[in-house]
Amino acid sequence: MVLAENLVLVFLAGLVTAIATGIGAVPFFFVEEFGDRWNVVLWGVASGIMMAASLFGLVDEGLANSAGGFPTLVVAGALAGVALVEIADWILDRVDFSNDNSDSTVDDSDDVDRPLEAKAFAEGDLKTLTLILGILTVHSFPEGVAIGVSFADLGLEGGVAVAGFTVPVLAVFMTIAISIHNVPEGTAIAIPMRAMGMSNWRMVGAAVFSSLPQPIGAVIAFVFVTWAREFLPFGFGFAAGAMIYLVLTEFIPEALKTGRSLPHSGRIELAIGFAAGVMIMTPLAYI
Ligand SMILES: [Zn+2]
């Protein structure tokens, strides 16, 4: 039987990782406006972080959880991730993003500063932003499942004593690893938000929101642990496929669009940023 306290603990572990994502957006509180050149570099950083997180973190983890032989589930997951981005893109193309109050497709009741931000978003920008936030939110679900699975041996001997619980070493490790992985991802989410003129606290909110599937996924996985274990290779492949495809089809083109006025459309700035992002994320992905 699964005790309620256990579920709360697993949920809290997932919540910690979600809050870590918000921390990644905080550096933007301390910088004002960026010029085009810096924005291109930052799009590059975001792309590099996501590529490295996908290839060295998720795909690697997916393969480690596969039974050997051809990793069918990881590949199938990656293809499903690509399909998700395509479908989301297709759907969003049909949504009306003009901020017309009488005919709004998005329900915003608490928006005091809406008119200001509406000006900051060109219609295309808002669509891109929605797509990026949506895909990153979905990608974090399998990571939550991984956290939940790591708690499978909760209460058994050999764990670490945390607040009256005997927590498996693997769970402590997973919670820390995913939290660390989430900080630069939060930065990667904040970069496009900032480039498109979103306010500071909204950026933090959006970053935390994008990781809320983690506590939810963790609890579901903890309850259905046998099912969740089998899902992992597919889940990791899925998260990686969606992120890589998002970088290729949204981040890079957006960076080049931003860099239009720079020499070589800002390709040099983009490459420098990308390399920096890979260098930040690669060591973290191997924790
Ligand atoms: Zn991630």
Image (cartoon, helix red, strand yellow):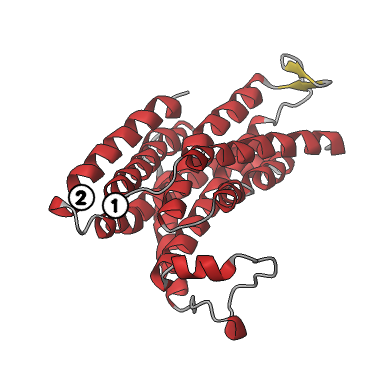
Q: Nearer the viewer, mark 1 or mark 2?
A: 1
Residue at the image point whose x is 38% and y is 39% from the top: 49
Which of the 4 image quarters holds residue 249?
Answer: bottom left
Q: Is residue 100 above or below residue 275?
A: below
Residue at the image point whose x is 52% and y is 42% from the top: 29
Q: Amino acid at mark 2?
A: Gly
Which of the 4 image quarters holds residue 226?
Answer: top right
x and y, in percent, of residue 57 in the image = 43, 34
Q: Is residue 270 left or right of residue 93?
A: left
Quarter that holds the N terminus = top right
User: Farthest residue toward the top?
Assistant: 158
Q: Is residue 164 above or below residue 71?
A: above
Element type where label 2 sits in the image: helix
| Label 1 – label 2 distance at C-alpha | 9 Å
Q: Which residue is mark 1?
A: 36
Label 2 C-beta lies within 8 Å of the nearest ligand 1 atom? no
Which of the 4 image quarters holds residue 166?
Answer: top right
Q: Is residue 7 above or below residue 176?
A: below
Q: Is residue 182 left or right of residue 128?
A: right
Q: Amino acid at mark 1?
A: Asp
Residue at the image point whose x is 41% and y is 38% from the top: 59
- Residue 9 visible at all: yes
Q: Nearer the viewer, residue 85 or 61?
A: 85
Give the mark nearest the N terminus, 1 or 2. Answer: 1
Q: Which mark is residue 266?
A: 2
Element type where label 1 sits in the image: helix
x and y, in percent, of residue 216 in the image = 69, 47
x and y, in percent, of residue 2 in the image = 83, 37
